[in-house]
Image (tube, rainbow, N blue to C red):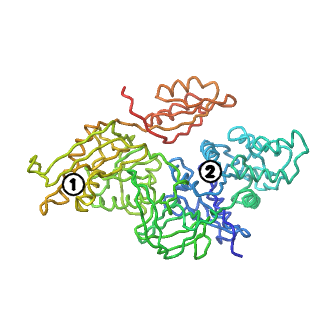
Amino acid sequence: MHPTHTLNIGILAHVDAGKTSLTERLLFDHGAIDRLGSVDAGDTRTDDGGIERRRGITIRSAVAAFTVGDTQVNLIDTPGHSDFVAEVERALEVLDGAVLLLSAVEGVQARTRVLLRTLRRLRLPTLVFVNKVDRAGARPGALLDDVRRLLTPHVAPMTAVTDAGTGGARVVPRPPDGRTAEALAEVDPDVLAALVDGPEPTACDLAAALAARTADGTFHPVYHGSALSGQGVAELVRGLLALLPPATAATGAEAPRGTVFAVRPEPGGGRTAYLRLYDGEVRPRQRLAFLRREADGRTTEVSGRVTRLDVVGGGATLTAGNIAALTVPGGLRVGDRLGGLTDRAPQFAPPTLETLVRARRPDQAAPLRSALLALADQDPLLHVRPEASGATALLLYGEVQMEVLAATLAEDFGVEAEFAPGRVRYLERPAGTGEAAEEMPWLDHTRYWATVGLRVEPGPRGSGVVFAHETELGALPRAFHQAVEESVHATLRTGPAGAAVTDCRVTLVRSGFCSPVSTAADFRGLTPVVLRRALDRAGTVLHEPYHAFEAEIPPDTLAAVTARLAALGADFTGTTGGDPAWLVTGELPARRVREAELRLPGLTRGEAVWSSRPCADRPLKRR
């Protein structure tokens, strides 16, 4: 029977909680693979990169599928390490629901708290799966109390465990009871009214409320089991099908709309893109047009015919709600939007760590640059820029990402690379409007047979660099006009203060040439001179990146922690809680985040839970 429903599920967890093992178990139990892989042995289905197999962590999102009855479940296995937060959030964008994995031994961990906060903020339907109940030290009962105390009170167990912590651990279904009703009453007014005024909610009432509140992301059913033995996995699957809403398409939509959320390199040098389709259909050889937001804020179009279409789960046509691996000439990048899809697109703050990369061997400089450009296609937040020194500048999220990148270059491309210590990346924005112009040589004795006049003015936040013209279109030959535009973008990579200039509008207000003497090289040479002069007249403001942070700390350490964070330049946005912990939130300069992470354990007896992520930037405070 061909599936009539599709469910796209993400498995998220703290590192080593067992999400890759759970993926293997789900695929094996439902006939998608004929043997179980092992993370320790490095032969799992979804961790197919060499660095992933060796380190035992999932780095890039991978897709696999299995079928239960009339539903095809697509599993999107996501990274657990915080340095790959962009991968996680890009995967969340295409999900219908999630499974948050906890270890019954290690319990609620720092990353787990961050993940559930993100899932609740997005109101993404989420089931909780307590893994490793058969491991020594497993404590499912106490862990459920920790979940209510540290994660969210809006949970209820759907299964029970006997002989926990032993090889004979068994999982059995647990029907909704009075405690389930009380927990649901906190988020469902109908259940609350039934408990207060009567009659008592029936089992059917509780089941309907459980499905509704799970679907809107306000309640989280808890399941138990072991990915290695398979205990409890069948109950989890029944919960997935019963409680999570399947993918749906917009009624009457004809044009295909979707998003590219992952890109994988092929052995022959090509790239395969993973497309989640929201509306319409995609067929082989169909011509598609994708919109791409460039690093400098420009929007460009990538179009071409589908030369390869592999629908996850099989089939010749990609239908709404499903995922396919496809190839389009010219190559797609993560974040490319089919059909102008913008409302579903998350806004990611750019990475704030910048480093320089050089090839250890001079003859590998060109292969290194090619390899980095190929990897940047897989991750649009990995910005690659050549430096005058011959090195390549990269933007990253953290040190682990740098380690993984170095290993990927060595294993996948055969290039040994050296990374300079990371430094915080600053940006410049115009403070006002400035204009400058240069005429051809018979007027001002310049070396360039060109006339260029440019105006620089501030643009909206997030707009990047926008190039426009007030001169008559066609006044310059196309090659000359293109030379001016390309030179504007290249020049603004380094502003007066040494940082990249962004969020500005550059307008060509004057132009001229002398045929047949003028060449594109004249315009490439003169444009930077004029633009720098206009930028000097406009003035620029240097901005530094900030991180939004959350710190859970013991109550008796509140004064010491807030005093230290304030001394590091933090601006606080909230302080809530009290028992068992205070939650302190705010924003901190990125250059001070590492110091905060190092100081916090000593101030809190090692009990603090800290998380931060890039959020925005602000004018640099001169001290």
The kind of residue on which mark 2 rests is Ala
- Residue 496 on image: x %, y %: 27, 39
Q: Which residue is mark 2?
A: 13
The kind of residue on which mark 1 rests is Arg
Q: Name the secondary structure under disc 2.
A: strand
Q: Counting other residues with Cα less than 10 Å from the Cα at mark 1, is it few (<14), some (14-19), or many (20 or more)?
A: many
Classify the position of the N terminus by image quarter. Answer: bottom right
Q: In the displayed image of the protein, which residue is found farthest to the right?
A: 199
Q: Count the numbered circles shown.
A: 2
Q: In the displayed image of the protein, which residue is found farthest to the front?
A: 472
Q: Residue at x 56, y 62 (%)?
A: 62
Q: Nearer the viewer, residue 572 or 55?
A: 572
Q: Counting other residues with Cα less than 10 Å from the Cα at mark 2, is it few (<14), some (14-19), or many (20 or more)?
A: many
Quadrant for residue 121, please give it.
top right
In the rendered structure, the answer to whether residue 327 lies left or right of residue 93 reads left
Q: In the drawing, what numbered circle is on residue 199? A: none
Q: In the drawing, what numbered circle is on residue 524? A: 1
Q: Earlier in the sequence, mark 2 or mark 1?
A: 2
Q: Name the secondary structure under disc 1.
A: helix
- Residue 513 on image: x %, y %: 16, 57
In the rendered structure, the answer to whether residue 581 lies left or right of residue 439 reads right
Give the vertical position of 295 relative to 182 (above or below): below
- Residue 385 on image: x %, y %: 33, 52
Classify the position of the C terminus by image quarter. Answer: top left
Q: Nearer the viewer, mark 2 or mark 1?
A: 1
